[in-house]
Amino acid sequence: SYYLDDLDSAVADAYRGGLARLEAAGARLVDVAVVEEPRIRSLVRLIMRSELSAVHRRRMAANPELYPLAVAKFFTAGEGLLAADYIDALRLRPVLTAQALATTYSQVDVLATPTAPVTAPRYDALTDAGDPAIWAAITRLMHMTQPATYFGFPALSVPLATDGPPIGLQLIGPPGAETVLFRAGAALA
């Protein structure tokens, strides 16, 4: 599935442990299908880059020293995107959101996923904005959180690992489910 393919072993182990803790706290775990698919990542990036570029363009031009190269590169990536593609991504959002609500969230109160498929790298390892491997690593870190962002669903990331690099369990709910998310998150604390 979108959320469970290609997990680092440490993340997979922590995820299973987090699910066991939720179950021990009284949650009933069920497997559900999700509508999330790789194209959601493209839709999220298209919207995000377009909006970041529009919001920061003038400030970046006036104060380039405020934007490290990696940030500036990410923000300016939206300048060459087509407005028609941006509008299409926005128009597709309610369709995919309705599908998610009708399928996944009609069966569960909360969707529990890893927050990221890999452990977080050190920040100082991500400074070379020209390195494609670094961009791939950053993109991979955002993989699991992008669907909730695209749908506009509330989500909460709860730390699972207490030693080593951070690993989190992401809890996603339908609109209005913040109280349920906080209760589920408290069960993991």
Image (cartoon, rainbow, N blue to C red):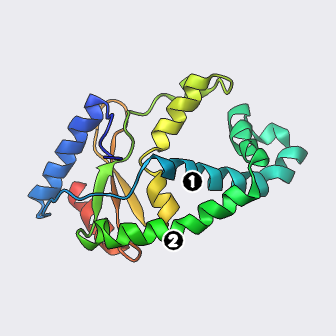
Residue lying at the far bottom of the rendered structure? 176
Amino acid type, callout 1: Leu
Q: What residue is drawn where x is 29% and y is 60%?
A: 111
Q: Mark 1 or mark 2, which has the lower sequence index? A: 1
Q: Is residue 113 left or right of residue 124?
A: left
Cα distance in 3D space between marks 1 and 2? 12 Å
Where is 3 relative to 91, above or below? above
Dot 2 lies on which element?
helix
Residue 133, horizontal then vertical, whole percent: 55, 23
Residue lying at the far right of the rendered structure? 62
Residue at numbered disc 1: 43
Whether residue 93 is visible, yes or no, is yes
| Front residue (pair 29, 180) | 29
Residue 149, horizontal then vertical, whole percent: 50, 59
Using a 10 Å C-alpha cutoff, classify the residue at mark 2 as few (fewer than 14 neighbours), some (14 to 19) or many (20 or more). some
| Front residue (pair 126, 99) | 99
Q: What residue is drawn where x is 21% and y is 48%?
A: 18
Where is 82 relative to 164, above or below? below
Toward which corner of the image does residue 24 lie, by quadrant?
A: bottom left
Whether residue 124 is visible, yes or no, is no
Contact between labelled residues 2 and 1, with CB atoms less than 8 Å apart: no
Amino acid type, callout 2: Pro
Q: What residue is drawn where x is 48% and y is 44%?
A: 142
Toward which corner of the image does residue 166 lie, by quadrant?
A: top left
Q: Count the marks.
A: 2
Residue at numbered disc 2: 94
